[in-house]
Amino acid sequence: EYDGFVVETLESRLSLRSLKVPYLSDCRFQAGALETANLTDLTTLDLYTCEFQDRSLSFLKRMTSLTSLRLTHTDVGFEGLKTISTLTRLVALDLSSTKYGAWCCTLLRPLTRLTALSLCYCRLGMRDFEYFSTNTSIRKLNIYGSPVGEDEIRMLQKNSHIRSLEIT
């Protein structure tokens, strides 16, 4: 069985620390493989352009060693962010071009080790900029393609910890 082959292949790599699976053609199948595979030691996971739904991200809860997660161009929204917020070891998170909205910033608060955050082309609101202005762990913030006005710039200026900022 192909399904079993993928799971066995993933599990046989006990030293696997990084997994990149962009542009999956059948993301529902792959999510199932990731759910059943024992990948608790994984530190980097890149699921660029996979059509994961919020509910299909439940497998992330077992990946407590993750320090870097890229979910660019996925359908991650509020429920998916609740799952992501349990990954307290994350230092890099890319949610660019997702369903991230102004109501999501409160779910990022448990991620106190987060130093790099990318929210390109997301619907950001003033709550997000308030979060950015008070967060002392974020050093690199990429909000390219998200609307930024004078009020938002003033909020960002309050944070002297941000060392790299990408905006348009």
Image: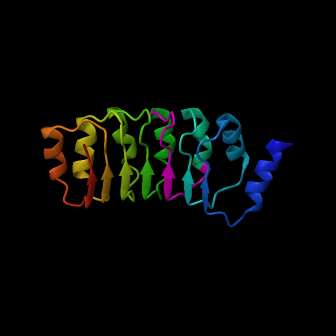
Location of residue 78 in the rendering, given as x and y in whole percent from the top left corner: 45, 33
Residue at 46 percent across and 55 percent down: it is: 88
First to last magenta residue range: 62-77
* Secondary structure, magenta segment, majority class: loop
Residue at 72 percent across and 44 percent down: it is: 33
Left or right, residue 119 beside residue 68: left
Left or right, residue 136 beside residue 29: left
The figure's colour scheme reads: rainbow
Magenta-span inclusion, residue 132: no
**Vertical arrangement, residue 144 with respect to residue 103, above or below:** below
The residue at the far right in this view is 1
Location of residue 123 in the rendering, given as x and y in whole percent from the top left corner: 33, 33
**Vertical arrangement, residue 25 with respect to residue 86, above or below:** above
Location of residue 46 in the rendering, given as x and y in whole percent from the top left corner: 55, 51
Residue at 46 percent across and 33 percent down: it is: 77
Magenta-span inclusion, residue 70: yes
Front-most of 88 and 77?
77
Front-most of 64 and 47?
47
| Number of marks in picture | 0
Location of residue 97 in the rendering, given as x and y in whole percent from the top left corner: 42, 37
Residue 65 lies in quadrant: bottom right
Residue at 23 percent across and 36 percent down: it is: 126
Q: Quadrant of the N terminus?
A: top right
Residue 54 lies in quadrant: top right
Q: Quadrant of the C terminus?
A: top left
